[in-house]
Amino acid sequence: MVGELYAAVRAEDDPRRGHARWRHGRDELFRSHPQSPLRPGDPLRVTGLPYWPYDPQLRFDVPLLHAGQDLPVSVPTSEGATPMTRLGRVHLPAPADAVIDVWWLRQYAGGLFLPLRDGTAGESSYGGGRYVLDTAKGADLGGQDGRLIVDLNFLYHPSCRYNDAWLCPLAPPGNTISTRVSAGERLPAAGG
């Protein structure tokens, strides 16, 4: 279902409309899917998930940069560690002019993975960071010829933010920036 949602978003010619479709689709999945991480009775099933307003300045078409040798690591999770290999890096010109690691998950079905822990973590977003790409689940916006679409408006909380029964990789040091990214999913009390 997540893969189908992202396919519909990729088919949109307007990123803002694609983002609105994504938000609506996520709300529906969180509200009614049998594997929703929301517990029964969670008010977010009714209100929907909170987000900051869409900012077109936070959408980038960036090359996947070579980062030297592949770096296999065990990345901390909410319950231990998960094996990943660093494939490369991407340069995000805003809001922090940062270079962030891109990982390959060595479990599930594999796939590109780009978590980000920014200056909002623990205050107005989940303390362990948020995800912007998880291609194992089809959660990506595409890209061509060694490039990725990275739209920080699509940052979302991992399932373990809602339910500790879920196991979630947390953002490692190469995916941590101090700059606040007030885009994507936020905590309910964060305003916006």
Image (cartoon, grey):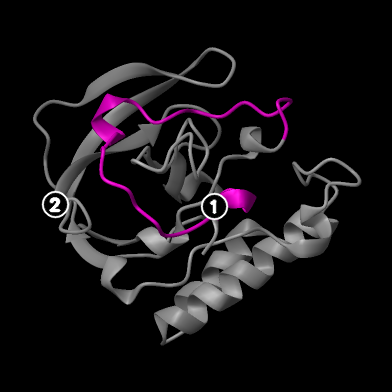
Earlier in the chain: of badge 2 and badge 1, it is 2
**Disc 1, SS:** helix
Is 36 placed above or below 104 here? below
Q: Is residue 86 magenta?
A: no
The residues tagged by marks 2 and 1 sit, at their Cα atoms, a distance apart of 24 Å
Range shown magenta: 163-190
Which residue has dot 2 on it?
A: 97
Q: Residues within 10 Å of mark 1 (few under 14, many from 20)?
A: some
Task: Give the amino acid type for the residue marked by disc 2 in the picture.
Answer: Asp
- Decide: is 140 above or below 106: below
How many numbered marks have been drawn onto this rendered protein structure? 2
Q: Is residue 144 visible?
A: no
The kind of secondary structure the magenta stretch mainly shows is: loop
Q: Which of the pair 8/43 is nearer the observer?
A: 43
Marks 2 and 1 close (CB-CB < 8 Å): no
Give the side of residue 140 with respect to residue 162, left or right: left
Seen at 25% across and 66% down, the residue is 60
User: Would residue 33 appear left or right of 161 to someone viewing this image?
Assistant: right
Residue 146 in the image, given as x and y percentages of width and height: 20, 57
- Residue receiving disc 1: 190
For disc 2, the neighbor class at 10 Å (few under 14, some 14 to 19, many from 20) is few
Please tell me whether residue 166 is drawn above or below residue 2 in the rendered image.
above
